Image (cartoon, rainbow, N blue to C red):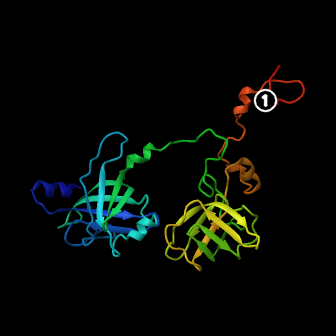
Amino acid sequence: MTGLMETLATGATTLCRCWALTRRDGVTMGFTDHDQPLVFDGITFRADTGMTARALEISTGLSVNNSEAMGVLSDAAIREADIDAGRYDGAEVRSWLVNWRDVTERALRFRGTIGEIRRGAGAFDAELRGLTEALNQPQGRIYQRPCAAVLGDAACRVDLDAPGLSAELPAEEVEDGRLFRFAGLTGFAEGWFEKGQFRILSGAAEALHGVIKADRILPDGRREIELWQEIRADVLPGDLVRVEAGCDKSFVTCRQKFANVVNFRGFPDIPGDDWLVSVPTQSGQNTGGSLR
């Protein structure tokens, strides 16, 4: 930073902007508006992508910073198929001001994530959301009956790789990227995977996933997995997939299905709405009718 300030003080104009984009699947891509590629932090920032960005408007408070990244869709850089598949949803973005004569002289000017992406005429516009966007999210635990943890996360601590909690097998019959039917997915009770994760491990849709809406055993003995939303890339028979047990976040399920009540993150004993209108009685039942 000090070196960059000294360069700016000389009135030199050897400046450019560089962006590093890291998708949630770990893929990192670099772009620059300089006319030659640049390399630093182990990232090659390509100059032939047509990637540009509007001036950053960084404000105080918790509002979203008004900035957009714009670029040309191409097979070599950002492909429309990957945007359609959701691979860039929530991707991390970093932006530097760089002295292209000496890339050690640079300053990080923006860090955040990609929000809404708009496409058209072979190009894209991506909304950039700053780090303050995370402060708009609810924080802390919620006083509620259901568990607030996500199955398998650090709070839940269930090991989804344990026997009986997941299965990996090739896709067999695929319909509209949302219905998957298997003859070889046996040994699990019907509904075992409902509300669980369906992950694609190979093929064009690798690293994409969806939430399981229904888990049915068909009359012919095959198993049908239905997702809430279709996988937004082609899943072909033979692609490796992984299905994980589902959790409805209730105390009973935590105890009977996962034997994990010690890590239950809900409050199962809080009174419900019916408690507010309950009255003491010596005999009979409170049916909701007149008390007279």
Residue identified by numbered label 1 = 288
Horizontal side of 95 relative to 230 (left or right) equals: left
Q: Is residue 65 above or below residue 123?
A: above
Q: Is residue 140 above or below residue 215?
A: above
Task: Please state, as top left, top right, bottom left or bottom right, where the C terminus lies in the image.
Answer: top right
**Where in the figure is residue 5, as x and y percent of width and height?**
18, 54
Q: Quadrant of residue 218?
A: bottom right
**Where in the figure is residue 111, as x and y percent of width and height?**
34, 54
Q: How many marks?
A: 1
Label 1 Cα crowd, 10 Å radius (few <14 / some 14-19 / many 20+): few
For image coordinates 34% across by 55% down, the residue present is 127
**Where in the figure is residue 268, as x and y percent of width and height?**
71, 41
Using the image as rendered, state which of residue 254 and residue 104 is in the foreground.
254
Task: Please state, as top left, top right, bottom left or bottom right, where the N terminus lies in the image.
Answer: bottom left
Find the residue positioned furthest to the bottom: 238
Using the image as rendered, state which of residue 3 and residue 170 is in the foreground.
170
Q: Is residue 151 above or below residue 234?
A: above
Please state which amino acid type lies under the numbered disc 1: Gly
Find the residue positioned furthest to the right: 283
For image coordinates 76% across by 73% down, the residue present is 221
Q: Is residue 102 above or below residue 258?
A: below
For image coordinates 66% across by 44% down, the residue present is 266
Say which element carries label 1: loop
